Amino acid sequence: MMKINYKLYSLAALLLLLVGCKIHTSEPKTNLLGKTEWFDPNKPASTYCNPVNIGYNYTTENHNGIPESRRSSADPVIITYKNEYYLFGTNQAGFFWSKDMSNWEFVYGSFQRRPADDDQCAPAAWVVNDTMFYVGSTWKKDHPIWKTANPKSGRWTRHVDTAMLPTWDPAIFQDDDKKVYMYYGSSGKLPLVGTEVDYKTWLPVGNQAEYAKLYAATEVEDIQHPYGEIKEVVGLDPANHGWERFGPNNDMEPAPWGNFIEGAWMTKHNGKYYMQYGAPATEFKGYANGVHVGDNPLGPFVYQKHNPMSYKPGGFVIGAGHGNTFADNYGNYWNTGTCKISIKDRFERRIDMFPAGFDKDDVMYSITSYGDFPIVLPTKQRDQTKGASAGWMLLSYKKPVTVSSSEECMEVQTHRVDNGGKKVFEKFCYGASNLTDEDIQTYWSAKTSNPGEWLQLDLGRKMQINALQINYADHKATQYNKAMDIYYQYKIFMSDDAVNWTLVVDKSRNDKDVPHDYVELTKPIKARYIKMVNIHHASGLFAVSDFRVFGNGLLEKPKSVSEFKVDRSATDSRNAMISWKKQSDAIGYNIYYGIAPDKLYNSIMVYDEGSYDFRGLDKGTKYYFTIEAFNENGIAEKNQIIEVK
């Protein structure tokens, strides 16, 4: 293994920057291509890690009246077209495509008319024969439907110049009989609606005179109304469904703006229609996807007993609502969703994707346990009822970090709605400990974006390292909207003694926008220290939310959890206090629950704590619970399942 003295390397790099001359080192020539013994930028990954690593667009200047530059996207739709995957999200000035659901390429395809406009908020995309169709969200009646037979060109023509139907959070579904349906709506008061549409005119079927009030309407309450043959398809029932309640922990009753339902999507399976939706609001950890099931594309639909269908209220990635369900090229299902950061803007968000499917009883599920650890990409059809975790554990949690410099603490006006919608000033610090706290809302920032700024982790002992995830943060960024020269460059060194360093990952020639860069090593390496050296940062100061390391700690797994209890409230059965005895040999716990012992599909990840205030149960439903502890070395045996009436 070729080793270099890092101090000498840094001096040589500094001389290179100062005089512009070439420095010849003993590193193998293959490094000129970015390839090392442990990393090959041209080798496809076998795993991915949430958040999905795409070039999230920066918001337009002063978007939502907030001056800070920040990235965001949400409300994803992934579809397949000619055996490739296409990802569309809110306000991206285009879209992404991939051959393997891991390496995503951007295609510029903006429809923005004015600099401050949204550009395709919460879009829908679908395929008919060899043509891809696309539409964004609007309550206006002047929105085109676009189409293309060559999406990678970024060029679209208009299928319809003016869509008279409002397309807010739209979802398009073509049934086996070729009839086309559209579902839409976003409201804290009204249910989602759906209708069959005339494919050629994109008007709702039926007597057009019955839609005159719709075409003339200007208020949302009037627009999202079931005129003519438009049907109410699904609404919320927070009085009975705890997870549908508004609030940071489903705890704001009454909801100040209502309990929001949005993000419609339709999936057909075994002759049944699965009407999906997001609730109760995008800025909360409990943002989830629910599902109702029916025998017809416009219902009536019945609430599935297992709900929410996709739910991730804990861990580094938090939130799973408002996405879509798609089948990969092998027939496996996946559910996409929206995860929150919600600091610079309550709509500061990212995209996640989880294994999903239908079990032997046609119950729709999504598996989010260890959903922000590496997940194995599909290569064949497989059973996903247990998820698709790679089995690589988190090695970096709360490990000590040293850095080249740190920004000072400052008072920051935040825009989250945890305090009933009030904007508040909070003191934010940007110290090194934020790099390993598993909190996507905090980050470390260097004082500059200069080449040579660095961060260094000490794992405490030699561990087996399989993958890394660098989650960049937007600190004092200056970019607004899309630019094609946004990229990151860095090198990662590893060491056993923090003196002699080995170059493991070389991204010094990367030209791709990778704000949540996930690096799967071609073979594992054992090391104690990990050092990342900045070369080029996309915008603003060199800042990282979490530097996450995955692999195996090579020691003992934790013991099984003891004193596990679920105390369901006698006065409000939507709530339960879950408790257990904290363990010194564990860094975290996964709580599993479901409607039957063999259907524990939902999970809640908790770090450090010995209890969890759970407010996501449905009245009148009997549940089953279990728990497991985990650490760097693996996962403990699950506890005996508890029945909770």
Image (cartoon, rainbow, N blue to C red):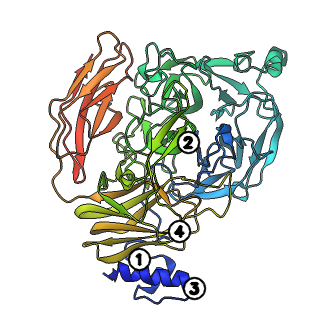
Q: Nearer the viewer, residue 601 or 469?
A: 469
Left/right placement of residue 638 relative to residue 90 reads left
In the rendered image, the quadrant that contains the N terminus is bottom left
Q: Around disc 1, counting alpha carbons within 10 Å, would you say few (fewer than 14), some (14 to 19), or many (20 or more)?
A: many
- What residue appears at the point 40 percent right and 34 percent down from the top-left corner? 313
Instruction: Identify the disc placed on residue 450.
Output: 4
Q: Amino acid at mark 1?
A: Thr
Q: Which residue is mark 1?
A: 36
Real-space Cα separation, disc 3 to disc 2, in angstroms: 39 Å
- Where disc 4 sits, the SS reads loop
- What residue appears at the point 68 percent right and 58 percent down from the top-left corner? 483
Mark 4 or mark 1, which has the lower sequence index? 1
Q: Nearer the viewer, residue 441 or 566?
A: 441
Asked if the residues shown at circle 3 and circle 4 are in contact, with their CB atoms under 8 angstroms apart, the answer is no
Asked if the residues shown at circle 4 and circle 1 are in contact, with their CB atoms under 8 angstroms apart, the answer is no
Real-space Cα separation, disc 4 to disc 2, in angstroms: 24 Å
Mark 4 or mark 2, which has the lower sequence index? 2
Residue 300's x, y, as percent?
A: 57, 16
